[in-house]
Image (spheres, rainbow, N blue to C red):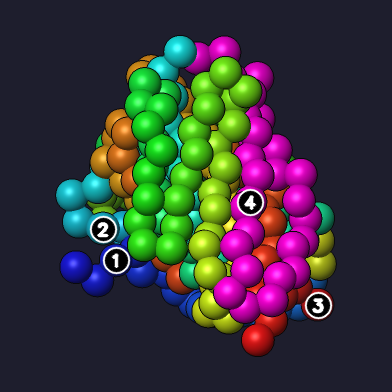
Amino acid sequence: AQKVTQAQTEISVVEKEDVTLDCVYETRDTTYYLFWYKQPPSGELVFLIRRNSFDEQNEISGRYSWNFQKSTSSFNFTITASQVVDSAVYFCALRRTPGNTGKLIFGQGTTLQVKP
Amino acid sequence: DAGVIQSPRHEVTEMGQEVTLRCKPISGHNSLFWYRQTMMRGLELLIYFNNNVPIDDSGMPEDRFSAKMPNASFSTLKIQPSEPRDSAVYFCASSLASGANVLTFGAGSRLTVL
């Protein structure tokens, strides 16, 4: 079965703090893709990053970084020096490939509140 | 590119009425997805199409829900009759049909059934 778990329901930090959002996934596939999406208060879902199961290199994009560890089935997301504009719901998701290419399975989301 | 276009953005209706949500995917994308978001259940996949053909509708709640994709540029999600528990945000997304490809989401249709 495919499953994504985001154990942190809500996180509250003060601006400029670093924060890590956890994501643990379950799959029996050897090939798959992992994603992070952001849902700001306006409601749209914004793509942040995609990672395939063969690439365990960490990735950094500005204040955002992602740590993919296949051994622990985790794909954690860190925001460095958080800002108020980072306040949103963040979703981790898993997509199978090849074959059943469709389903993007989401975790329950982590609500991040960054206070000034 | 205009992105995935959904209409209406907001719909308020009374229990028992028919509701039709519409989606125009990104041109060239051959996979289309309908998701529902609620506080209790999060983001659930209802149905998805590849090349206009429904591939997996196991997430469709019950017979009151139906989805069609008559051509590559248009899809509908219909609820008949609607019930208060159908109140949710319904998202449409599209992508190229490969697991590597990113789903691009529309802005969502917020449905309230009174």
Which of label 4 and label 3 is nearer to you?
A: 4
Disc 4 is attached to a residue of which chain? A
Describe the element under mark 2 as helix, strand or loop. Answer: loop
How busy is the neighbourhood of tag 1: few (under 14 within 10 Å), some, or many (20 plus)? some
What residue did someone put label 4 on?
A21
CA gap, disc 4 to disc 1?
28 Å
Identified by mark 4, the residue type is: Leu
How busy is the neighbourhood of tag 2: few (under 14 within 10 Å), some, or many (20 plus)? many
Q: Is residue A3 magenta?
A: yes
Describe the element under mark 1 as helix, strand or loop. Answer: loop
Q: Is residue B113 magenta?
A: no
Residue at image coords 76%, 51%: A8
What residue did someone put label 2 on?
B26
Task: Specify whether A45 is left or right of B53.
Answer: right
> As displayed, is residue A83 above or below residue B96?
below
Identified by mark 2, the residue type is: Ile
Q: Check if mark 1's residue and mark 3's residue have beta carbons within 8 Å.
A: no
Residue stretch in magenta? A1-29
Which of label 1 and label 3 is nearer to you?
A: 1
Q: Check if mark 4's residue and mark 3's residue have beta carbons within 8 Å.
A: no
What residue did someone put label 1 on?
B3
